[in-house]
Amino acid sequence: MGMLSLNSAQATTLNDVKTHLAAGQVQQTIQDALDLKTSEAYTLAAEALVLSVRKHILDKSNAPLLEQAENYARKAIDLNPRNGPAYYQLSKAIGGQAVLRGALGGLGALSETRELFEKAVQLAPEYAPAQVGLAMWHANVIKYGTLTAGLYGGKEQEILPRLQKAVELEPTVISHELNYAKALVILGNKNKRLKSKYLQDARKHLQKASQMPILTFWDREDRAEAVELLKTF
């Protein structure tokens, strides 16, 4: 009985996975997820890997990490085909790998990544990162140019409402404010008439992001980026 109690006390929980993820402990997050072998745990393992490479996405050494993230996301979906966040992480992993293949690779994955973001939003509309992911998909497609936007269906009206919803869903997450600012900069560069307003709004979001409390390891990275980006305004 004593041994059973000890084993129960040491058993990995989903909260353990989330705690290690928030602390930026990628390998421990993955190990805990592999112990649990649940759909949500595999999703968090994929998220840990995706987050670990996001600030240096063009580094070729990221390829095996993104492949591993893709595998974990697919395992999560196999276990639960209605796991919205898993589709989001799968899109991020596939998109990251495409970027490493160069411009043509990035363009080649646009349709697939959009479908995955849309699936994530459909299944989990209250999952803020999915709203951000789809919004930034449209923003980045528009950034490629009018021809690409027309070919792949990039739409300005899909951007700000989704980012606003994400901020409302998770008002303490710094990355949402950071992405909001980045999207506004893209829109400002594409619209001369509204450029001043868009850039003014972007500055406000960066100011907010640079002053928000750091709650996770990833928040620290995002706030530092917001501070540096704000210096360019």
Image: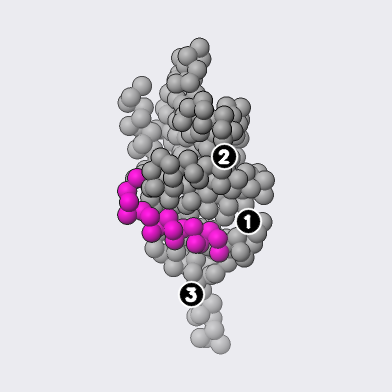
Residue 51 visible in image: no
Q: Label 1 belongs to which residue?
A: 83
Q: Label 3 belongs to which residue?
A: 10
Read off the magenta span. 57-75
Q: Earlier in the sequence, mark 1 or mark 2?
A: 1
Which is more toward the observer, 93 or 109?
109
Residue at the (53%, 53%) spot, across then down: 90
Per the model, the C-alpha gap separating discs 3 and 2 is 39 Å
* Location of residue 200 (image quadrant): top left
Q: Main secondary structure of the magenta part?
A: helix
Helix, strand or loop status at disc 2: helix
Q: Amino acid at mark 3?
A: Gln
Q: Amino acid at mark 2?
A: Leu
On-image quarter of the N terminus: bottom right
Q: Nearer the viewer, mark 1 or mark 3?
A: 1
Which is more toward the observer, 34 or 220?
34
Q: Nearer the viewer, mark 3 or mark 2?
A: 2
> Residue 89: percent from the left, percent from the top?
52, 52
